[in-house]
Image (spheres, helix red, strand yellow):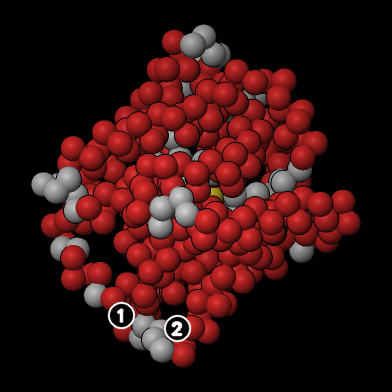
């Protein structure tokens, strides 16, 4: 099978049925660097300080990018958005809690904490929009649903982590509350407040700021995995355990894809709405989850983010296949294709990166995935 070149990419891609995002390779390379040259002593102190600042910068940019007006306009389709939020912050956590039965035979306690954490993070925005557009679904609904999920996750993810993970996420102490407010909520609200003055600048320089996002998250990953290496946490993970983790995550993804699709049909949603619900309600944001984990888990963040990193790449591959099949479905072929792609293009310019520019997504209507 010959490789293809997608619109906007600079080189050939792998076969469309196996999209490997370059940013995932960068994340893997960062983990490898932390394994070979972990930061320790003074270097670790400097790296941790820089990572703390990077997390604050990320959430400031999230706030500056999120269009409050579009979010309020999206309330007109409240049933769809409520369904997506319920999938993200209710169904996912319930399935995560049910997986506790797999400890310690299938998952170790540390891997389970990371698995449960991935069930608590918000949905993606950019990839939800792109996949919905590719499948000829309700693109405006995907924009609003992803934005609501990202906004709600600022508050709900830390609170759910404190409630369900307890001491595994540092507990719900005054110190953890202060960290959440100072490192996540305050920068986000500052970005929202300053959006009227800096929104245009952010839009004009979204490519440059996207590199800042990606670099910031790579720094967070490096410090987290450096702490894991110096603390010896990797001695607790074997290749067999990682294989079992991948299997459990595959079951989780399959369950959510089925529940979002058939559940939306049972609730009476039309096909375009079901497509938006499936893609927005079945995925988790790596860009939002990584900085949150660094705040909530501290030195234990390495194992906490590993399940999320694996799940993120898995969801991209599987959803890319599903989106292409949905696009060829006779029921949707020819329906709102051009309109959907036009809206998606506008969404990329107006709301791009609200789930973090580190979210690798496919170009709307393209044959492969590419990083941003």
SS assignment at label 1 = helix
Query: Contact, CB < 8 Å: mark 1 with mark 2?
Result: yes
**Nearer the N terminus, badge 1 or badge 2?**
2
Q: x%, y% of residue 67?
A: 76, 43
| Residue 352, numbered label | none
Q: How many other residues sit within 10 Å of disc 2, few (<14), some (14-19) or many (≥20)?
A: some
Q: Residue at x 61, y 32 (%)?
A: 145
| Residue nearer the viewer, 72 or 214 | 72
Disc 2 target residue:
44
SS assignment at label 2 = helix
Task: For the C terminus, give its image quadrant.
Answer: bottom right
| Residue nearer the viewer, 81 or 268 | 81
Judge from the rendering whether residue 95 lies leftward or rightward of residue 295; answer left or right: left
Instruction: Give the residue at the far bottom of this rendering.
Output: 42
Disc 1 target residue:
230
Instruction: Give the residue at the far left of this rendering.
Output: 105
């Amino acid at each position: 099978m010959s490789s293809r070149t997608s619109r906007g990419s600079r080189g050939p891609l792998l076969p469309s049925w196996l999209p490997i995002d370059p940013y995932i390779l960068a994340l893997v390379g960062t983990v490898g660097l932390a394994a070979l040259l972990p930061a320790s002593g003074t270097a670790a102190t400097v790296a941790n300080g820089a990572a703390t600042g990077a997390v604050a910068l990320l959430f400031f940019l999230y706030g500056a990018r999120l269009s409050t007006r579009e979010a309020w306009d999206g309330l007109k389709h409240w049933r769809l958005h409520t369904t997506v939020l319920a999938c993200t912050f209710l169904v996912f956590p319930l399935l995560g809690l049910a997986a506790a039965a797999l400890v310690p035979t299938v998952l170790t306690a540390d891997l389970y904490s990371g698995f449960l954490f991935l069930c608590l993070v918000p949905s993606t925005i950019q990839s939800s929009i792109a996949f919905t557009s590719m499948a000829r679904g309700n693109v405006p609904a995907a924009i609003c649903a992803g934005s609501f999920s990202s906004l709600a996750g600022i508050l709900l993810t830390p609170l759910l982590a404190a409630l369900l993970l307890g001491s595994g996420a540092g507990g719900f102490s005054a110190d953890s509350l202060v960290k959440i407010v100072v490192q996540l909520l305050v920068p986000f609200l500052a970005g929202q407040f300053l959006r009227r003055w800096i929104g245009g600048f952010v839009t004009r320089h979204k490519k440059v700021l996207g590199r800042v996002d990606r670099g910031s998250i790579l720094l967070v990953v490096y410090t987290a995995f450096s702490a894991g290496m110096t603390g010896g946490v990797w001695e607790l993970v074997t290749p067999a355990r990682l294989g079992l983790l991948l299997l459990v995550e595959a079951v989780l993804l399959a369950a959510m894809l089925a529940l979002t699709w058939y559940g939306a049909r049972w609730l009476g949603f039309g096909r375009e709405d079901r497509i938006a619900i499936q893609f927005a309600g079945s995925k988790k944001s790596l860009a939002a989850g990584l900085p949150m984990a660094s705040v909530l888990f501290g030195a234990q963040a390495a194992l906490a983010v590993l399940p999320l990193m694996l799940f993120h790449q898995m969801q991209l591959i599987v959803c890319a296949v599903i989106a292409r099949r949905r696009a060829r479905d006779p029921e949707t072929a020819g329906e709102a294709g051009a309109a959907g792609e036009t809206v998606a293009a506008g969404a990329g310019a107006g709301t791009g990166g609200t789930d973090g520019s580190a979210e690798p997504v496919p170009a709307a209507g393209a044959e492969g995935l590419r990083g941003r």
